[in-house]
Amino acid sequence: MSANPENIANVTYECMRCGTGVTVEELSRLPEIKCICGFRVFRKARPPIVKQLKAI
């Protein structure tokens, strides 16, 4: 499975302390990985759409 550049640009992370959303591009521009609140721990934000699967 190869990484698609379009999918990488759409990935957003959110701060574990304040919940501020940040994109990968914004994080790459900063000299260090840190939120505006000063916290350094991020998690990948999940998309709001829930996948539904048919039962077998």
Image (cartoon, rainbow, N blue to C red):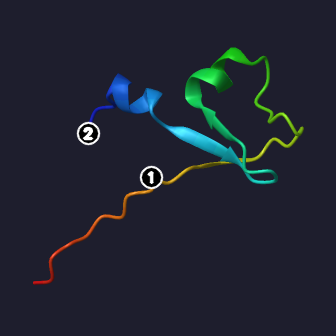
Q: Within 10 Å of the Cα at label 1, are there few (<14), some (14-19), or many (20+) other Cα atoms?
A: few
Q: Is residue 8 left or right of residue 43?
A: left
- Mark closer to the chain start, 2 or 1: 2
Number of numbered discs overlaid on the protein picture: 2
Residue marked by disc 1:
47
> CA–CA distance between discs 2 and 1?
20 Å
Q: Please identify the quarter of the rendering in which residue 51 is found.
A: bottom left
**In this view, 14 is above or below 54:** above
Amino acid type at circle 2 is Met
Residue 30 image offset from top left, x and y in percent: 74, 19
Q: Which mark is residue 1?
A: 2
What secondary structure is found at the residue carrying circle 1?
loop
Of all residues, the one furthest to the front in this rendering is 48
Seen at 49% across and 37% down, the residue is 11
Could you tell me which quadrant the N terminus lies in? Answer: top left
Q: Nearer the viewer, residue 11 or 1?
A: 11
Image height check: is 52 above or below 26? Answer: below
